[in-house]
Amino acid sequence: MEQLDIFADSRDVMLRNDVLERLQLRDAVAARAALAELACAYPDDAGLPAMTVLVNELQCAGSAPFADHAALAIAVRRLENEVTPAAAHVLPAQTVRAWLAPCWRSLAKRAAPLPFRNAHAEHHATPLWLLVGDWAAAHEAVEGIDSWWRIPSPLAWMAEARCRVDGLDAAWPLIVELAWLAPARFAALLPRLGDASLDALRRRFDAEFPGMGEVEDYSWFPAWLLVVKPALSGRLGDARTQPGLAASRAAALLGELLRREHEGDQHKLVSLRQRLSRLHAGLFRAYMATRKVQHR
């Protein structure tokens, strides 16, 4: 009798594992059959609702392109609010991300025909490609956006894709442009990149830069970077300047100052330093603190 009780206690585990095994194999038909058997034997099993969501995702996920941005938004919300929690509830923690990746990839493919709309910036294929780590597809999707380098969202996407593929050194020009164009997006991108050296520079900037303590201060990050890391001037010099932005003009001015210092033209240096002082007095003081010469 005791052996029968043990068997009865373990049967629910066996049936539950059958469902999970077929879910991991992404075998929708077999998973549905195993789910039905579990539900018949144990209709109150706590895992049934979540397993049902995952089986439905395998069986019912569409493949046709989204008709519009609203349809994509609905699909993304469902994956975020229903499928992801269900996967986290019943699947082993170390497998959840991998199980969800094909779901996100499917949405990215279906979203590919949708044009970029600034009002629906996140409802585009690129963020989905970034989510699954397909950097090449993300790069290609951004390239399809007209004047993407002038728009904060695609510029941030391209900066991330470039950094993932080619490293921080190659991505510096895009990161710099993002800081000028959209300081808040720049601040949000840095934690996503997870680069230790970049994080250290941000912490140092936060501690040292004589700004207002607001997110807009990050527009001055590139100019400040030239003060503390002048060796980066070559890479930062490849960034597309924004003449209408004071922070961009300051970075260009510092780049010229660094070049003129090697030439030793003191008269020109004085003129350039005066211009920098007018653009941002605190940045000018930080620059002069690193120089042996004194401003006249």
Image: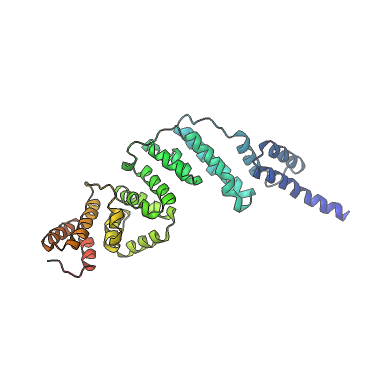
Colour scheme in the image?
Answer: rainbow
Between 41 and 55, the residue placed more toward the observer is: 55
Give the quarter of the image for residue 269.
bottom left
Q: Is residue 105 left or right of residue 87?
A: left
Q: Is residue 145 above or below residue 256?
A: above
Q: Residue shown at 38%/63% (left/top)?
A: 200
Q: Quadrant of the C terminus?
A: bottom left
Q: Looking at the picture, how far across and down is residue 181, in whole percent? A: 30, 47
Percent x, y for residue 183? Answer: 32, 51
**Percent of width and height locating residue 107:** 51, 37
Residue placed at 36% from the left, 44% from the top? 155
Residue that extends furthest to the front in the rendered view of this protein: 263
Nearer to me, 39 or 266? 266
Q: Identify the residue at horizontal 62%, vertical 37% (top origin).
A: 58
| Whether residue 211 is visible | no
Residue 204 sits in which quadrant? bottom left
Image height check: is 63 above or below 197?
above
The percent coordinates of residue 275 (x first, y second) are 15, 57
Residue at point 36%, 60% (across, down):
202
Position of residue 23 in the picture relative to residue 136 (left or right): right
Q: Across the whole image, how many numbered discs are drawn on residues?
A: 0
Asked if residue 18 shows in the view, the reply is: yes
Between 35 and 96, which is closer to the camera in this rendering? 96
Residue extending furthest toward the right:
1
